[in-house]
Amino acid sequence: MAKFEFNPDVDAGEVLDRIVEAYGFNSKLMLAVHFNMAASSLSSRYKRGIFPADMVICCVAETGVNLEWLVSGQGKKFDDSILDTLEIENYKLVDRQICELGHVMIDKRMFPKNNPLPNDLISVINNEKHLIVNREFSDVFDGKWLVDIEGKISFRDLTLIPIKRVRVSGVGMAFDCDISDIHVIGRVIGEFMING
């Protein structure tokens, strides 16, 4: 294996552009939102030219991108022989709506080995956590779900009660309603802390 040598004079703007690419974002603004920074702060990072070590470390940890490619542009973006990842759409829950943030890579090993991978997964960032949501389901059952209640999206605990009704809890006061009164988007099948 060739030795990786870090060049401290690398163009920080190019590294930031590769970070945007590694996350699958469509714009620099999406990167700023992901790192909870103002667009002007990200713009100043481009202008100052200081190597963004903190963002590089987070990007490698969250996406599994090849460090050498991220820093220098050399080599493969992802080492397929090491990674067994799945790229899924990434969203953020903001003011009870979900905003698209591009894509995120997740490790397939988080799923049981003998079960087929779900076909319609998304990631939703909420309160410093990535929640993996499966939008492919045939039945609603007890558990944590992403739901739309009168145009407001949130994560709720659903508990089935007799005759096609459900108890909705987890945010504010719990209430009972017909299952048809809410729009169930998907079931939470995993969650993990961001940068944790």
Image (cartoon, grey):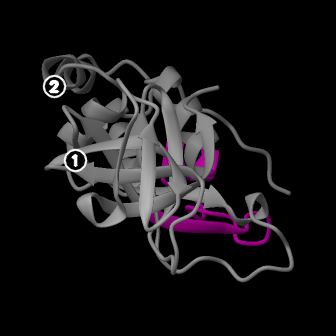
On residue 14, the disc is none
Q: In which quadrant will I find the N terminus?
A: bottom right
Viewer-proximal residue, 189 or 107? 189
193, above or below 131, in the image? above
Q: In which quadrant will I find the C terminus?
A: top right
| Among the 4 quarters of the image, the one containing residue 105 | bottom right
| Among the 4 quarters of the image, the one containing residue 41 | top left
Identify which residue is drawn at 58% across, 30% down: 57
Identify which residue is drawn at 24% across, 27% down: 46
Q: Which residue is mark 1?
A: 99
14, above or below 126, in the image? below
First to last magenta residue range: 64-88
Callout 2 secondary element: helix
Tell me if residue 181 is in the magenta stretch. no
Callout 1 secondary element: strand
- Residue 136 x, y percent position in the rendering: 48, 77
- Residue 190 x, y percent position in the rendering: 63, 50
Amino acid at the residue labelled 1:
Cys
Tell me if residue 87 is in the magenta stretch. yes
- Chief SS of the magenta region: loop
User: Badge 1, how many Cα within 10 Å: few under 14, some, many 20+?
Assistant: some
Viewer-proximal residue, 68 or 105? 105
Identify which residue is drawn at 51% across, 21% down: 54
On residue 39, the disc is 2
Residue 169 makes an appearance in the image: yes
Amino acid at the residue labelled 2:
Ala
Q: CA distance from mark 2 to mark 1?
A: 16 Å
Find out whether the residues at labels 2 and 1 contact each other: C-beta distance under 8 Å.
Answer: no
Viewer-proximal residue, 28 or 90? 90
101, above or below 34, in the image? below
